Image (spheres, helix red, strand yellow):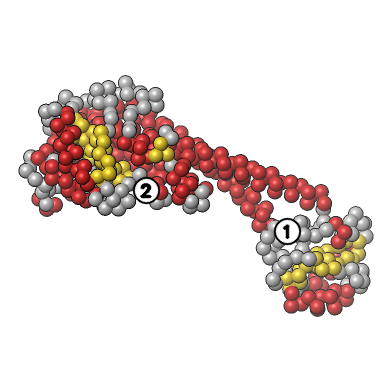
Amino acid sequence: WNVRLCALLVNQPGNMSAAKDQNPHGGVYYLIALPIEGHKDATWNGLRTAVEPLCSSVTKFELPINDLRVGTLDTLVALSDKLTKDDYHAEQLAKKLAQQLDNLLEGSKDKLLECLQANDQTLQRYLERFRWDTAKFNVSLQADSLRQDINKKLTEIESDMKQKVSAYRKVQSSLAALEKKQTGSLLVRDVSNIVKPEMFIQNSEYLVTLLIVVPRRKRDEWLATYESLNEFVVPRSSQEVPVEDREYSLFTVTMFRRVADDFKEAARNYRYIVKDFEFNEEALAEEQQLLLELKGDIRKKFNMLVKWCSTMFSEAFIAWTHMKALRIFVESVLRYGLPVRFLPAIVLPKAKNGVKVRKALNSTYAYLDGVEEEQEDEKMPVVAGIGIREYHPYVNFNMDIAQFLRV
């Protein structure tokens, strides 16, 4: 295979190494693969010598290289393109789950950090001790079938997330609507929990008690005029209902049922608002019971959703890491050829050392492109579809774990 040209053609944009090399938070890992030339230990020691002083961590990235199935060149080229898209999708799903957790936990970074784990380990520990999980992803499958297996897991998580979040939001909306009725201005507020049964004439064929919202500045006017709005208003029947409201007061008034509509029309002329309300103790009890049930339901669904999102973030992150691992394998075979003989490693630069580490790597391994040292940008090879700064003389993909706390 013309592996050098092939590697250039398939190393598509999406790695975004230039954008993330700054590594200000020390949370961007460089997942790299180097060809083994001579003894494996010599390759490993050469990497450590080049970057270890600049890094928080330099560890081997354990891949089942001898078990993964290579396939044909055409298959690997097509697979490389698919993996670019699948890698992005897996990362975005993990971000969505982190964002959902952040929303549920109301921005508490300490609680969020507790939830963002992989296999009950910190993300950093999981990556630095990575082992391929054969129970989840069978390495005996063809590489593309393996990719599809990982994607299937991610698709199931995404579908379940939409359903569970939708169910939670439905209960959340119902509770918010019910609570909104019990707060706010008297113009829109449900007063069922404010008024008392003794304030109303109940079960009368002839009499009815209405509730009137009166602007506070017109309170005295109401008390002086309400009896004159209709001759069938019961004298001295208006009582003020104790309620806190800066703009309005609430009064009851009793009259003959048959003149209620005429009274409402007369009240509007004075800018008094008659609330559409009739006291129903049974309906009030049902509404209070519904409110209690919704509050209990929302607490239960909240706890379940936090636990589910935390568990599924772990699963999505593990799937994303395996997708990266498969991508490293495919790109290394395409670039370095057969037999499969390369060293995968994962490097975490110290805070603000990302650029220095990248320069050290590019300089140390510039010979892989047939040059003695790292070239300046304007001298580097340009290939259609690849940004100059996105290409390195070794296989490289970044994993930004700090992004999950920046959601």
How many labels were placed on the picture?
Answer: 2
Helix, strand or loop under label 2: helix
Residue under the image location 59 percent in, 46 percent down: 170
Q: Measured from the top left, where is residue 277 in percent x and y?
A: 79, 59
> Considering depth in this image, is 121 or 404 the residue closer to the camera?
121
The residue carrying mark 1 is 190
Q: Is residue 267 above or below residue 112?
A: below
Instruction: Name the mark nearer the viewer: 1 or 2.
Output: 2
**Amino acid type of the residue tagged 1 in the rendering:** Asp
| Position of residue 366 in the picture relative to residue 176 (left or right) | left
**Amino acid type of the residue tagged 2 in the rendering:** Gln
Helix, strand or loop under label 1: loop
Q: Measured from the top left, where is residue 40 in percent x and y?
A: 17, 28
| Position of residue 350 in the picture relative to residue 44 (left or right) | right
The local crowd at label 2, few if under 14, some if 14 to 19, many if 20 or more residues have their Cα within 10 Å, is few
The residue carrying mark 2 is 403
Q: Measured from the top left, where is residue 262 in percent x and y?
A: 84, 69
Residue under the image location 81 percent in, 78 percent down: 221
Residue under the image location 36 percent in, 47 percent down: 402
Res 193 seen here: yes
Residue under the image location 78 percent in, 49 percent down: 285
| Position of residue 157 in the picture relative to residue 12 (left or right) | right
User: Residue 210 has which mark?
Assistant: none
Q: Residue 252 sits in which quadrant?
A: bottom right
Quadrant showing the N terminus: top left
Find the distance from the CA under tag 1 to the CA under tag 2. Answer: 44 Å
Q: Quick one: which residue is furthest to the front in this view?
A: 53
> Considering depth in this image, is 149 or 182 the residue closer to the camera?
182
Q: Is residue 372 above or below residue 183?
A: above
